[in-house]
Structure formats: C-alpha cells, structure tokens
Image (cartoon, helix red, strand yellow):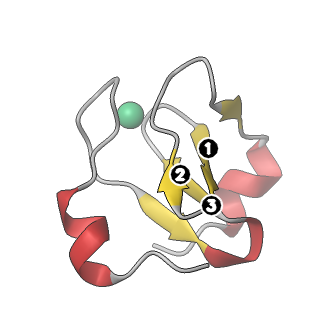
C-alpha cells in the first residue's frame, strides 16, 4: 500500500484542512497540527476525526518534516 505524491497533494486534514504527512511504516496519514493519525485501509484514507488516533509526543518528534 502506498499513497503517492499526487494523491497526497489533494488530501487534507478534515479538521484543519492542513497538509497530511504519509507515514508508510504505519499506513497512516498524519496531521502535525492536530497531532492526529488517520488510518489508510485497503488503499482508502479514512479521513474522519472519529477514525483518527492521537499521536504521542515521541511519535510527533519522529515525523519526517
Ligand atoms: Zn489537522
């Protein structure tokens, strides 16, 4: 499973409409501003606030910039 650059460019956080960071290792799309990770299941990004999980401080620090 992969989210390519083109797809990533049109995706936005449903809460703040900000850019998302693709974390391939976890198949998650991360919003740094909201500290939330949205799961990607069967190639479909679950961009819903109730699907998201909160990131720990450690996880936030490990995000690619
Ligand atoms: Zn956000």
* Label 3–label 1 contact, CB within 8 A: no
Q: Is 49 positioned to the left or the right of 58 in the image?
A: left
Q: Is residue 5 above or below residue 54?
A: below
Dot 3 crowding, Cα within 10 Å, few <14, some 14–19, many 20+: few
Earlier along the polypeptide chain: callout 3 or callout 2?
2
Disc 2: which residue: 30
Q: Is 17 positioned to the left or the right of 29 in the image?
A: left
Say the numbered circle drawn on residue 42. 3
Q: Position of residue 30 (x, y in %)?
A: 53, 51
Q: Is residue 27 above or below residue 35?
A: below
Front position in the image: 48 or 22: 48
Dot 2 crowding, Cα within 10 Å, few <14, some 14–19, many 20+: many
Per the image, label 1 sits on a secondary structure element best described as: strand
Disc 1: which residue: 37
C-alpha gap between disc 1 and disc 2: 4 Å
Q: Residue at x 61, y 78 (%)?
A: 1
Q: Position of residue 47 (x, y in %)?
A: 45, 37
Q: Is residue 21 above or below residue 4?
A: above
* Label 1–label 2 contact, CB within 8 A: yes
Q: Position of residue 15 (x, y in %)?
A: 34, 23
Q: Residue at x 53, y 80 (%)?
A: 2
Dot 1 crowding, Cα within 10 Å, few <14, some 14–19, many 20+: many
């Amino acid at each position: 499973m992969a989210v390519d650059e083109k797809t990533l460019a049109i995706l936005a956080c449903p809460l703040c409409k900000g850019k998302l960071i693709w974390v391939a290792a976890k198949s998650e799309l991360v919003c740094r501003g909201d500290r939330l990770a949205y799961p990607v299941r069967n190639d479909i990004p679950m961009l819903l606030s109730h699907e998201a999980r909160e990131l720990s401080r450690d996880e936030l620090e490990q995000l690619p910039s």
